[in-house]
Amino acid sequence: MTEKIVLKNIDIPGSETIEVYLSHGGYQALEKALSGFQPAELIEEVKKSGLRGRGGAGFPAGVKWGFLPKQTDKPIYLVCNADEGEPGTFKDRYIIEKDPHLLIEGIIISSYAIGAHQAYIYIRGEFVKGAGVLEKAIAEAYKKGYLGKNILNRGFDLDLCLHRGAGSYVCGEETALLESLEGNRGNPRLKPPFPASVGLFQSPTVINNVETLANIPAIVMKGAEWFAGIGKKGNTGTKIFAVSGHVNRPGVYELPLGTPLRELIYQEAGGIPEDKKLKAVMPGGSSTPVITVDEIDVDMDFDSLAALGTMLGSGAVIVMDESTCMVRTTRRLAGFYAHESCGQCTPCREGVPWMVTILERIEKGEGREEDPDLILDICDNIKGITLCPLGDAAAMPIESIVRKFREEFEDHIREGRCPSS
Amino acid sequence: MPKLVIDGREISVPEGTTILRAAERLGIEIPHLCYHPKLPPVGLCRLCLVEVEKNPKLQASCSTPVAEGMVIHTESERVLKARRGVLEFLMLNHPPDCTICDKAGECKPQEYVFQCGIAESRFIETKRVNPPQDFGDKLVFRVDRCILCQRCVQFCREIAGMEELGVFNRGGRSVIGTFRGKPVENKYSGNMIDICPTGAITSRDFRFKSRVWNLTMVPSICPRCSNGCNIFIEFKDNKILRIRPRDNEQVNQCWICDEGRFGHHFVNSLDRLTTPLIKNGGKLSPTSWEEALGRAAEGLGRVIANYGAESLGGIGSAWCTNEDDYVFQKFLREVVRTGNIDLGKIREEKDESYPGNDFLIQPEKAPNRRGAEEMGISPGEDCRDREGMFKEAAGGKIKAFLIIGSNPAKETGAREALAKVEFLVVQDLFLTDTAKQADVVLPAASYAEKEGSFTNFRGRVQWLNRALRPRGEARPDWKIICELANRMGGDFSYPGAQEILKEIAEKIPAYREVSLEKLRADGILISTK
Amino acid sequence: MRLKDKRLNILEYFYIPPILKGMGITLRHFFSRKVTVQYPKVKKEIYPRFRGAHRLEKNEQGREKCVACELCATVCPSKAITIEAAESPDPEVEKYPLRYEINVLRCIFCGFCVEACPKEAIAMTDRYELADYSREALVYNKEMLLK
């Protein structure tokens, strides 16, 4: 049993209350950070720990903090991205609902590190329970003096505000999130400028994922070397894997980065029901290219998966067994992205719904011989062309499925129906 | 100044210039739809993508600033593939109705698709249908032609200052619309016809009037107010069909107001005077120029002979060109020898409650008040101004008027005064209330039918080119005055308005810098007194 | 080098052989099939691609196919076509030709209008007897062209 960092408290009854959190060593990291570290030292410490963003892109958190302008007359903001909307992902929700104070402590330390005096948590609108828990936890933290003016008498001020989203997937994209937080329609912004220089309310802003921030207290408490010792080189620490689909024990598993995928599916998640054969796995949520059964001997970390042409993403492992119709899967996926496209830029707005109609046709048995190639070409015309990563998120998995399961599409087209139903 | 290479050609541009603007300087046009030089870049259409070496992704050239040492390809295989892809996406739900679309011929997507050589669509599905939208009286909005570049939305927000349009719904269901079906009411809405890259927003006024390639364009100046916006008069069969803005950074950038754009119908009006009229037995009837001019010269001459030159008054016009007004006052001062000269009343209008950004429209509803005054349309020493003239006319001291391009009969007191004078000559486009009282009415050419210059309220002198043949037998005002002057002992032999301009440059100190070449370019700002 | 003239015999000198040859041809045609067509009693066969007077085509609903795009007028080398477009009274159609005139006096029957038409709304018939008593009658209006 490996050591848990982020999920260490979730099995303790009442873990969401500040009393239980404090009795298990809560807010000690904050005391240590405020008393023992200069902000710049904290950034250095996080850089040394090798902590990479847990939201999907895997960008080193300390480096991201370092992008903030050294001199600015504008306020600096920290925004916690809790808009966990990626299909298959349900890790942040656990932290929010079970251990909100860990997140809050992480936010306070990070704000201190980057010099922010106002932080926001942008929480997905559907997380009604989580929002309630966080609301209460924030109130508790204010009462105990961990938030507000002169925190722990160290002269550091921080206000934390919870903002509920309105149910748009694209608001998980950081600039769309900022727009939404400002009160505008949640449309991604044109980059550059990047949020580190022009972010929330035109000010320098750091946006971090819930899990990323929840790692910060442990790094402060136990040190960067300890953290860097977990997992693999360049992929340090643990990762919460949200395993779903055709497995016996779906759920969240916190394991060191670099745990083999086979181990995650067959040991941790208890294998596939009825001992069916594995067909495909989306290793990091619905936006990541699939890997086939031949490829599952891969380590679950950023670099190993990238080498395989896919991504660790948010760590949402979606397991599909042999009974899955890949055409239907693709159509459902494309439908999701077509529905969630903001509609600003052309390739995503027009291309993704086009793929949906083609896939619907193939599923209904009205596909044409040239359709698989047409879909691949459409994907190629979307990838890397769109304003924000949503276009890539739609095109990449679809392209990988059509490439890797092409014969299944061709069967549908040839037989005029779904062969597996 | 960063140095960079675009398509193998080196260029240095100021810091902050975008790739698209830098390429423009080299004469390389990168296709773009959502970008407009006067609007902030939004990077939505994704058509302007270019390849920047060492950058794994294609970059939107409309918003990416140049950097030292950049090597850019605008026509590489990868760029062309992406461009074709984006164009294909844009055309998926765009109806192929160029045959009936007023934008055809000046439509950007049409041009780009043609350049790319995409003839067949790979889209066999049914095109998206969105409910129609009403944009009010001035604009026709065809939602299915819209490619969602959002230029119009941005124009309303950034330029017109009234947020009247927005994007509704999301993703593939996105549509541009007005709020709760409210019509578009800003005074500059017509510009959206120009900036819309497709035929989604077209003009109701110009609708189906002509295919654009059949129009002739002549550069001119808008006469609707004293701002002097640069325009193109676009006409066919000697009829103005539409007015469009002409770029002039000093005056109107690339915009004009709706009044200027749609208010050209008076030129083509059927009510225009087409022949000279003379009063016979209390009734005006058509006659020849010869007879009308003879009657006018004889009538004015009689009054001068009987009562002296100071019994004659002249009213010039802020609607006439500098050349018209110069010749007019020269005639009165040098031939008639009177200083009773003043300007007709100018309508002033200021909409204080207008919520938008009223950045072009001036309250003075005439193009050339300043120019007219500088040409000498103002009372000489010890002479009467307009009100004084009408007062003296009512009192019987002023016996004759020569009025060009104004309608004082609408003013209180003036009507009665005009009824009392012995002889009245009026030059105008229409049979105004003043003209109805006249003994001789001479049909004048409109601004579109003559050459000349206007001086805007800031003192910028700009040149009008002749677009149309004058309606009927109408003649430019200066020409009529010359004829009259020659019949009354003067020697006014100007071959054209350009020669009058030369004389103005010689005689009027403020205008000494003025020359035709300068006026035809961006105009020239005259030195202020 | 100098060329020497061929010496002609007496018959050749008086052009007798060519005269006989010509007479022979005349004689042969005297007995072969006649080529003259007795127009207007008899009319020549007209080939399918003949370009005669124009006709505007109708669709299934009996309305003109023409949408007044003016491509025919644009391509016309002799500027014989005049179109005035308007909003169609039919709610299903957007634009239609309020006025469509072909000045047959100007027309050179090149057929470019037919080629340019994107709607196949204009065709050329096999009618070629177009003479009339006035110039006005030779400006065909829409109603005439639709017949």
Image: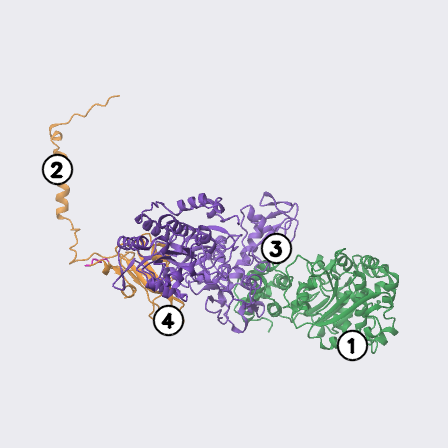
Q: Amino acid at mark 1?
A: Lys
Q: Colour of chain C?
A: orange
Task: Provide the residue designation for mark 4.
Answer: C89
Q: Colour of chain B?
A: purple
Camera-near label (1 vs 2) is: 1
Q: Amino acid at mark 2?
A: Leu
**Is residue C17 rendered magenta in the image?**
no
**Is residue C130 rendered magenta in the image?**
yes
Q: Position of residue C139 (x, y in %)?
A: 26, 59
Could you give the CA–CA distance between mark 1 and mark 2, rounded to whole angstroms?
Answer: 127 Å
Could you give the CA–CA distance between mark 2 and mark 3, rounded to whole angstroms?
Answer: 91 Å
The residue under the point 54% across, 74% down is B180
Q: Are marks 1 and 4 in contact (CB under 8 Å)?
A: no
Could you give the CA–CA distance between mark 1 and mark 3, rounded to whole angstroms?
Answer: 44 Å
The residue under the point 63% across, 65% down is A187
Q: Amino acid at mark 3?
A: Ser
Q: Secondary structure at mark 2?
A: helix
Left or right: B119, with B171 as reference point: left
Figure chain in green:
A
Task: Provide the residue designation for mark 1.
Answer: A136
In the rendered image, is residue C69 in sight?
A: no
Instruction: Please check whether the numbered discs 4 and 3 fall on a single chain.
Output: no
Instruction: Please check whether the numbered discs 1 and 2 fall on a single chain.
Output: no
Task: Provide the residue designation for mark 3.
Answer: B63
Q: Secondary structure at mark 3?
A: loop
Q: Secondary structure at mark 4?
A: loop
Q: Name the foreground residue: A139 vs C45.
A: A139
Q: Are marks 2 and 3 in contact (CB under 8 Å)?
A: no
Q: Main secondary structure of the magenta part?
A: loop
Could you give the CA–CA distance between mark 4 and mark 3, rounded to whole angstroms?
Answer: 46 Å
Task: Provide the residue designation for mark 2.
Answer: C20
In the rendered image, is residue B10 in sight?
A: yes
